[in-house]
Image (cartoon, rainbow, N blue to C red):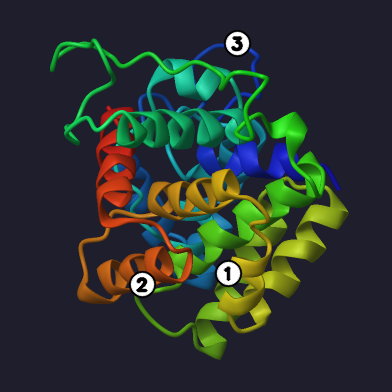
Amino acid sequence: MDAKKLLDSFLGARGGQGGGQSPLGGLSGGALGDFAKSLGSPEGVRSQAGKAADLARQNPIIAGGLLALLLGTRSGKGLAGSAIKMGGLAAIASMAYQAYQNHQQGQAAQTGAAGASPTAEPEFLPPPSGTDFDPARAPQGEEEFALSLVRAMIAAARADGHIDEEERRRIFDRVKLAGLDSESERFLVDELARPVDLDALIASAQTEAQRVELYTASRLAIEPDSRAERGYLDHLAGRLRLPDALVDHVEATVSSAKI
């Protein structure tokens, strides 16, 4: 299984490759949530099968693309183009690094990339290779940490309620339509079937940088509009031992990335 490619699909990233517009046209994060809702019944799954497969295969330019398709979540707006182009793992590392640096420098948390005007698209660059935010320096390896980030995004998306058996069957139908390789499909089916193991998720972050990245990925997965979602993120930040000021910088950086 290509864990980094799966993470790209979750974020709607391109893994550093360019390309044309998504086959679904200019679909926003909110519109994707509406599309995912249309897959809430067996009839909806069947009628939207072609679009669902295209959506996953083509990695549309939206945040939480595959995640929203599977769980019907509204992750919000699309990601900034510079974040999409570098791929999911590097994009998360870039946002986490920027938030961490701004916090270390004592800057005030504010929406928008450093040096960008409020109306400009923020520019995200890969983190420097000599830092712990460089994906290549992951102690457990890039692929293994990419799986941890996927698990973090799934856990965040599930924070607003329990998935009952009927909804689980619908999700599995969507997995079948998503155009994934068999290993990725089995991974998602297994992951969605088991309870969230927050202890294991926390333990998967082996460095301070990875703790920031794990939280950043979780925040990217959702717009915390409900008390349950906000409570989950606050609890996660506490378990990851992230200072409130750093969490504020992650919030600002992620918000600026969703344009």
The local secondary structure at tag 2 comes to helix
Marks 1/2 in contact by CB < 8 Å: the verdict is no
Mark 1 vs mark 2: give the one in front: 2
Which is more N-terminal, label 1 or label 3? Answer: 3
Q: On the image, which quarter does residue 168 sit in? A: bottom right
Using the rendered image of the protein, determine whether residue 197 is visible from the camera's viewpoint.
no
Q: Position of residue 201 (x, y in %)?
A: 62, 68
**Disc 3/disc 1 C-alpha distance (Å):** 30 Å
| Amino acid beneath label 3 | Gly
Image vertical order of residue 42 relative to residue 98, above or below:
below
**Disc 1/disc 2 C-alpha distance (Å):** 22 Å
Q: Which residue is mark 3?
A: 18
Q: Which residue is mark 2?
A: 232
Q: Is residue 20 left or right of residue 107?
A: right
Comparing 179 with 245, the one in front is: 245
**Disc 2/disc 3 C-alpha distance (Å):** 35 Å
Q: Position of residue 63 (x, y in %)?
A: 43, 39
Q: Position of residue 11 (x, y in %)?
A: 52, 39
Comparing 46 with 160, the one in front is: 160
Q: Which residue is at the far left?
A: 118
Residue at (35, 65) in percent of width and height:
233
Circle 3 packing at 10 Å, graded few (<14), some (14-19), many (20+), is: few
Residue at (52, 46) in percent of width and height:
213
**Image quarter of the C terminus:** top left
**Numbered label attached to residue 171:** 1
Q: On the image, which quarter does residue 81 sit in? A: top left
